[in-house]
Image (tube, helix red, strand yellow):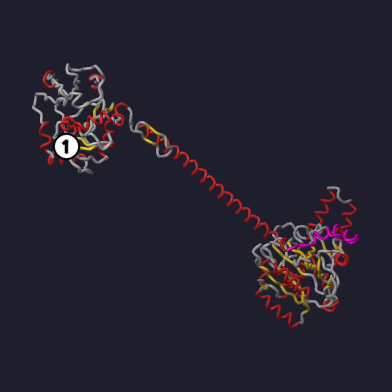
Amino acid sequence: MVDPKSRSSMLVCDICTQEVSSEDDMKSHLLLVHMEQYCPCPFCTISGLTYDELRHHIHTAHADALEPWSEDEGQDEKIHEGKTSSTNCTLGKENNTGNQKMICEECIPVDIEPNKNKTQSGCEVVNVPKNVDFLSRIPASEDFGLPTAVVLEKSAPPTASAAYIAGSEDLAVECPFCGETKNSIDKLEVHVRMEHGDLLASPNKGYAKQQYECPMCSLVCTNGNLLQEHVNLHLEESYDTAKITSDSILARQLQNEEDKRRRAEEAEREKIEFQRLQFGLDNTGGYRQQSVQNLQRAVARGQIHPMEFHLQKAEMMESLATGVDDGRTRTSGVLEALRQYYSFAGPDVHRVWLCSPLDHYSNSVGDKGWGCGFRNLQMLLSSVFFNDAYKDFLRDYRHIPCIPKIQEMIEDAWKEGFDPQGASHFRGKLQGTRAWIGACEIYCLLTSLKLKCRILDFHTPSSPMGTHPLLFEWVLKYYASDTRGTEGKVVCSSKPAIYLQHQGHSRTIVGIEERKNKSYCILLFDPGCPSEVMRRLTRKNVVAADLKQFRRYAGGLKHKQYQVVAVEGMLSPEEKAVRLQMSKVFQAERIP
């Protein structure tokens, strides 16, 4: 028997008699257990009703079942059913004292402690509060695994509903655990308590406490409030993580934007500097000024003797006066050394085509950094001068002009009417500047000299790998079109060299190899190669390692755009006039 004093501080659920310790727990209990669930009727098979609907149903459909429990105001009722054995229970006769209802343990079994509050007949007295509402005492059937209002909870006060069912008319009821049939609810309760008592766990004693599992980490909590606090911690942690992640993404985006802006500024600055250099607007002087400055710098560093400085300066002034290159950076005989190598070596080469003889010209102290176009033009002119097919048309130019003279010749071609757009681009002036020249200027100068030229623009890569196989095919076709001297491994063509231009630099194509694996490799003369290196090749037998600086395979030419200028014959005065008119709107042949 539970001490009434210890129970005075506990709150009892009017629906299922579960005890809770506080009002907050009672609210949570009512919300979770009763208000969000449907209640079945304890007297019939109807179910799926809310609490209010069930209350109305019982008072209307089962009003006669409520009559035995109507209470007299100001008095207590005796709720007792005698034992069915031969021994009569005298609890109802001897213990009608105070405002209490006496219920016999043997008539309606309850969980009690032995030898406490026993009557003379062995029955236990249980206090039941007066004015008990019947419907508010309906226990939830799912708490016991039995039909509604069939069995009272252990160690909990028996309710009026249980007392009513114990005194109701006999019924044919089947045990939900073993299937045995009893003819009354009372006998079924006794049977269940005696035979299946171990299956009835009392929530009040902690045998089946409700547990709450965290949906985020599967942690089990014994309290709804604890679960809520735990889930809030998860949400706060997720928010902090999301905030850190978003901050990192934002920082990365800002850094990328800053890098992009800086690269754009650098590219714009380089473009402006490149244009200034190309247009000759850097106000640093031309070939003559740079030559003198570099010679003075070499003397200050001890690289040359002062006497050498005056000697080179005198030769430069003489070259400028005559318009003829001083030949200090010229190297002759390199192409002949290559021909001898291919004749006796080169086991991987099936065939090689070489252009007509020419000299190599390197950059000097006066044009270093900007004179590659002029030096490649000198190589191309030397290839034409050594070719007997062009001698009659170049009687006035039997010597290779120096860079200032070439600048003057290009200006004369502009004045003659060639390429007015290019003339406007350079403001009509090249002398005294360090402006770069390209394929268009080379074409205009050669055409003004009555040389029949073609300018081709390989404006985009012709393979998925970003290379230009069509350029290699065109070079092979250009040199192989000369049918003279086609026998043997080395083909010495009468075709002049080819001017090759790409962004930032230019070189001269002097031949092409056909490898035994059916691949091709072009041979280039680069004005950036020092004259000392080129001259060493003419003093010894060329080996395979020496050809590394000349060979360029398809994978070695991966600039987006290449332009070539090729000489294909001579022009008559009429043809020159036609070319002059065509250059008013200058257009190159685009491949592909």
The residue tagged 1 is 171
Quarter the C terminus occupies: bottom right
Q: Nearer the viewer, residue 532 or 220?
A: 220
- Residue at 76 percent across and 71 percent down: it is 476
Q: Nearer the viewer, residue 498 or 421?
A: 498
| Residue 326 visible somewhere in the drawing | no
Place residue 368 in its image quadrant.
bottom right
The answer to whether 364 is drawn above or below residue 518 in the figure is: above
Query: Where residue 240 sits in the image (x, y, percent)?
Result: 46, 39
- Residue at 20 percent across and 42 percent down: it is 45
- For this orientation, the residue located farthest to the bottom is 574
Query: Where residue 524 sits in the image (x, y, percent)?
Result: 78, 64
Does the magenta run of residues contain 90?
no
Q: Nearer the viewer, residue 233 or 423?
A: 233
Segment tinted magenta in the rendering: 532-553
- For this orientation, the residue located farthest to the front is 86
35 sits to left or right of 470: left
Query: Where residue 78 sits in the image (x, y, percent)?
Result: 12, 24
Quarter the N terminus occupies: top left
| Count of number-bearing discs | 1
150 sits to left or right of 289: left
* Label 1: element kind: loop
Q: Nearer the viewer, residue 463 or 502?
A: 463
The answer to whether 274 is drawn above or below residue 209 in the figure is: below
Query: Where residue 374 sits in the image (x, y, percent)?
Result: 77, 65
| Residue 134 visible somewhere in the drawing | yes
92 sits to left or right of 312: left
Type of the residue with mark 1: Leu
The answer to whether 210 is drawn above or below residue 498 in the figure is: above
- Residue at 80 percent across and 54 percent down: it is 293
The answer to whether 240 is drawn above or below residue 566 in the figure is: above
Place residue 482 in its image quadrant.
bottom right
